[in-house]
Amino acid sequence: MACAASRSPADQDRFICIYPAYLNNKKTIAEGRRIPISKAVENPTATEIQDVCSAVGLNVFVEKNKMYSREWNRDVQYRGRVRVQLRQEDGSLCLVQFPSRKSVMLYAAEMIPKLKTRTQKTGGGDPSLQQGEGSKKGKGKKKK
């Protein structure tokens, strides 16, 4: 078995790992958050991290069935690990704007709230509430 230093940085097992807990503002540092709470996101998912990283041009893949060791909740929502390539075969950076794993995490946390899935969820909640109220009124009229 070869040591980690002798393997190429382009090998998939040499990609950095980002778990959603690293970016979650609901977690404490002891529970696994790795960025400041002011920059963290509420309950990010592995697919959201993948979307953001692949959109900027990073080589990314998701391991769906992996779990963060400090995550006590076993729900599907908390599963997943994102692997990101930081360095190329020759050891140079893939993208100059991402010299470290922390820079990738901060960028992902900044961009996840701007995703269409995040912005539509907040806007889509109001009409469903109005529809729910309308059906309640309809039920009330039938009882009279």
Image (cartoon, rainbow, N blue to C red):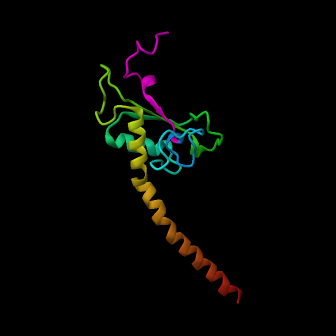
Q: Nearer the viewer, residue 19 or 131?
A: 19
Position above or below: 129 against 138: above
Residue 61: percent from left, percent from top: 43, 34
Position above or below: 18 against 5: below
Residue 112: percent from left, percent from top: 42, 49
Q: Is residue 12 left or right of residue 138?
A: left
Q: Residue at x 47, y 41 (%)?
A: 35
Position above or below: 44 against 90: below
Q: Residue at x 40, y 34 (%)?
A: 60
Asked if the magenta segment contains residue 78, the reply would be no
| Stretch of the chain drawn in magenta | 1-20
Q: Main secondary structure of the magenta part?
A: loop
Q: Is residue 11 left or right of residue 43?
A: left
Position above or below: 118 against 3: below
The quadrant the C terminus occupies is bottom right
Residue 20: percent from left, percent from top: 51, 41
Residue 45: percent from left, percent from top: 51, 45
